[in-house]
Amino acid sequence: MLLYQNDQSVCFAKVDPAFRRDVLNGLASRPRTIPARWFYDRAGSELFEAITALPEYYVARTERALLCSVADEVAALAGPGRAIVEFGSGSCAKTPILLSAVKPPAYVPIDIAKDFLWESAERLSQLFPDMPLYPVEGDFARALRLPSAIEGMPRLGFFPGSTIGNLLVPEAVDLLRTMATTLGSGSMLLVGIDRIKDPSILLPAYNDAQGVTAVFNLNLLHRINRELRGSVPVDAFRHVTLWNDDEARIEMHLEATRDVDFEIADGCFSMTRGETIHTENSLKYGPRDARVLLRAGGWSPVAEWGDQEELFSLILATAGPDHPHRASTNKSMLSRIMESCNQARGSNCNLEGAH
Ligand code: SAH
Ligand code: AVI
């Protein structure tokens, strides 16, 4: 199938071996599990965007408002001249807030969802025509070589959306360590982390009244059918959300509503009514847990901000362990935060060039 054509190349769709491996292994294992990163084909990315606009999905609007109110402080703490490298940039919806405050010499969005990556980059380049922009299509869980154009520039990593919550703790620690490798020594990282809260807020956020999250979850089966020659009867599955209190996580599953047999690539599968495929974890963290997580991942928190309702946190950290020398740096950072807080009080989030 002809996928796209540009000046240099003609590409043909081929099965992503990692997708095939994760689906076949995941459906053969018990419990059946498919990693959440495979949600984001084009339809999945668009559905996620629709989720961010839902009244129940407090995550996106809370982080956005928080970022608006603290972006100048982040910029003051990061200092001038840092290139921004965003992990899992998606639609880059919140990125203009940070770019306007930090005014980086370059911006590098990283995502596995390639169509979305390039379209978002195109939109951003119109908002910030003078800012060099270098999209990287890739898996942020692997140490990536960043574009040579930003060699020698200090870096500020940006990992918003609480995407870190989609990983189990050991995977999240590995990822944070990998990010430190990708970004290099002396880097900083701004990460968005969703907080533990009452399930009466959490559950509707992942099981909305309009059913958009259900369509997002079920789209994974459509993607399997499309890309892996699958015959999964999608109408025989329903979206299930639960709060796992012991693990402090929302879980999304796809539950078979009747006994089903289907084929994917060369594999044959049978599921009985009530069996599920576990498709996503969304871990939530208490404020201390989040800081411990960052430390375990090789980052030292230097500032943390939360919204008034304590729904969401943004944490700024520096690469490397805390030590006595840095503790004194932190003290001066604290006074800088206080100063910039005082300056920022009453000021609105102003997106230069953005609408
Ligand atoms: N940061 C955006 C988008 C969050 S959705 C926001 O806050 O709104 C999660 C994004 O991470 C998707 O765009 C998805 O394609 C990307 N993603 C998930 N796993 C990834 C991986 N392993 N490597 C690179 N990108 C990944
Ligand atoms: C991208 N990620 C942080 C979202 C979340 O909240 O876990 C994905 C999502 N899944 C269902 N709704 C949104």
Image (cartoon, rainbow, N blue to C red):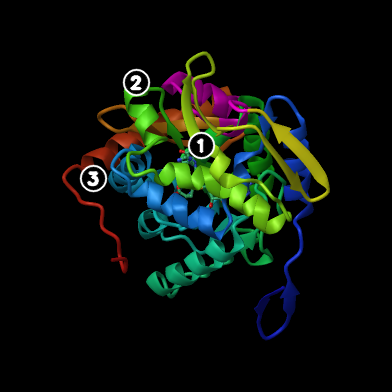
Check the picture and name the quadrant holding the N terminus: bottom right
Considering only order in the chain, which callout, 2 or 1, is on the residue closer to the N terminus? 2
Nearer the observer: mark 3 or 2; the answer is: 2
| Magenta region | 273-299
Q: Residue, x 30% and y 65% (percent of image)?
A: 352
Give the label, 3 or 1, closer to the camera.
Answer: 1
As shown in the figure, which amino acid type bears the numbered disc 3? Ala
Question: Which residue is at 50% across, 68% downward?
Answer: 119
Could you tell me residue 34's position as x and y percent?
66, 38
Q: Amino acid at mark 1?
A: Arg
Q: Nearer the viewer, residue 51 or 256?
A: 256
Comparing 58 with 108, the one in front is 58
Q: Are marks 3 and 2 in contact (CB under 8 Å)?
A: no
Considering only vertical position in the picture, is 102 above or below 239? below
Label 1, on which residue? 238
Judged from the image, the secondary structure of the residue bearing numbered disc 2 is loop
Q: Secondary structure at mark 1?
A: strand
Q: Which residue is mark 2?
A: 198
Q: Residue furthest left?
A: 346
Q: Which residue is mark 3?
A: 344
Q: Quick one: label 3, few (<14), some, or many (20+) residues within 10 Å?
A: some
Circle nearer the N terminus (3, 1)? 1
